[in-house]
Image (cartoon, grey):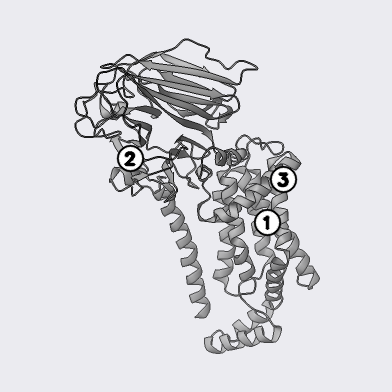
Amino acid sequence: MTDIRRTILWVVFVTSLFLLWDAWNKHNGQPSLFGGPARPAATAASAPGSAASAGVPTASAVQTPAGAVPQPAAPAGGEQVVVTTDLVKATFDSIGGQLVRLELLNYRDANHPDQNVVLLQNVVLLDRVAAREYVAQTGLITGQAGVALPTHLTPMTVAPGARTLADGQDSLTLRFETAPLDGRRLVKTYTFKRGDYAVGVRHEFVNEGSTPVTPQLYLQLARDGNAPEGESHFYSTFTGPAMFTSTSKYKKIDFKDIAKNDAGHDKTANDGWIAMVQHYFASAWIVNAEGQREFRTAKIGDNLYTIAMVLPMGEVAPGASKALESQLFVGPQLETSLAALAPGLEYLKDYGWLMPLSKPLFWLLDKLNSAIGNWGWAIVALVVLLKIAFYWLNASAYKSMAKMRAINPRVMEMRERYKDKPQQMQQEMMRIYREEKVNPLGGCLPILIQMPFFIALYWVLLSSVEMRNAPWIGWITDLSAKDPWFILPILMTASSLVQVALGAKPPDPMQARLMWFMPLAFGVMFFFFPAGLVLYWLTNNVLSIAQQWYINKKLGVA
């Protein structure tokens, strides 16, 4: 009876883990393995001028204060201006001076290897139907009745100048300017720097009218609610808005919470930034100077969401002007450079609650890669160092397993002898354990102590864009993609089965079958995991097998 209860508990435990994992996938917008809806797909583009297609800054997008003059419908499309640097190819629309497309020249899209990774997709040209909607927008609003200000829908004129960062040139400037609107102009200047994914953005408001104006600058990111193309159903990463303030720190905001008006984020603060996050990459509006600001999120159309930061510029008298400096980061989540841009920006690379362990592990992994020159071998080296650090804990666990394996024939014989007397069977089993000085849980506790470290390393490898397009050996040309020939997953599954063979055999046949089934079940999942993760797990298994075999041999256990 005791063994039956134990078997039932094992089944419940494994099933619960599987269901929790599936629920976590659904929580992050992934399809359930049992069917059911995933995150809503993008619908066809809305009619020109609608809030869904343009993110009009009225009650939907940046929520213009009551009394502000309604903005006109978005024009059909403006001049497309393409800027190319050593890192990016950025496309702007002269309607509002919006950034509507950006390609990362040093990163290839795993789903389209012949193209660069596209973060921001053009959705402003309203005669086009786009599968993705993801743009960076800015403009001015005010609470003053009867005052119209330039928004991201206002046509702008682009100043002439170079559009490509030439060899030897350190920076490149792109300048947009609106025509006077009741004597009021907005000048928007983008400054690209060599080797930098952060673009300096200067907004200058010029008041040539006859009355003072109190403008507010909004910095906005608009995106559809779809997960990035090609994202795996076997592991989940966050896609959606995020923000940071010194009060509430880093906060991820689910699209579904925005849709329910239940985002639950800070509405005002004296510092902070906003972002849109996806696996490996992010965009963020950053204003490092302290000062009052508002944070707003909204669902502005079918499967289209915005996050905005609104900053007051103060009163601007007639004949005066005022400028506000900001940065627009669009690029990879490189941990070593994010922290230098703004306080808390390193949290865009999300390690979850194990960040205190993950950050030093990544630091060590980065140092190993610098020394070795290969991320794959750096992973192997890091796992070796962890196994060395935990050698004595593992030795204790494997000794306990070896002793359990050694007494297994006695236990099996005793179970057969007392199969109709479960109480005596239990008493006799405890007597054998006492005589042989065996702790049935001795093999579990050391492993449980190590689990947080290996889970933290899992998140390091899953979250690090450094693994993207990083080769290891031979057929493994991208550690962030699955093994194209499935060699690593097959070896990993085989090594897990070897570990089962070397370990203590459960006395109950059903438990024994379950122990053989679990590596096969998890092995199937690893067929679709990034090669870097499988390499880490395979290395861990091989080192565990070597230590367990050595201890078995030392103790004379067959």
Q: What residue is at 43 percent from the left and 26 percent from the top? A: 121
Mark 3: amino acid: Leu
Mark 1: amino acid: Asn
Q: CA distance from mark 1 to mark 3?
A: 21 Å
User: What numbered label is drawn on residue 296?
Assistant: 2
- Find residue 289 and report its horizontal and vertical position in percent: 46, 37
Residue 127: quadrant of the picture? top left
Q: CA distance from mark 3 to mark 2?
A: 42 Å
Label 3 sits on residue: 368
User: What numbered label is drawn on residue 403?
Assistant: none
Residue 386: quadrant of the picture? bottom right
Residues at circles 1 and 3 in contact by the CB criterion of under 8 Å: no
Q: Residues within 10 Å of mark 3 (few under 14, many from 20)?
A: some
Regarding mark 1 in the picture, which secondary structure is present there?
helix
Q: Residues within 10 Å of mark 1 (few under 14, many from 20)?
A: many
Compare marks 2 and 1 and give the one earlier in the sequence.
Answer: 2
- Find residue 527 and report its horizontal and vertical position in percent: 57, 46
Compare marks 1 and 3 and give the one earlier in the sequence.
Answer: 3
Residues at circles 3 and 2 in contact by the CB criterion of under 8 Å: no
Q: CA distance from mark 2 to mark 1?
A: 48 Å
Label 1 sits on residue: 541
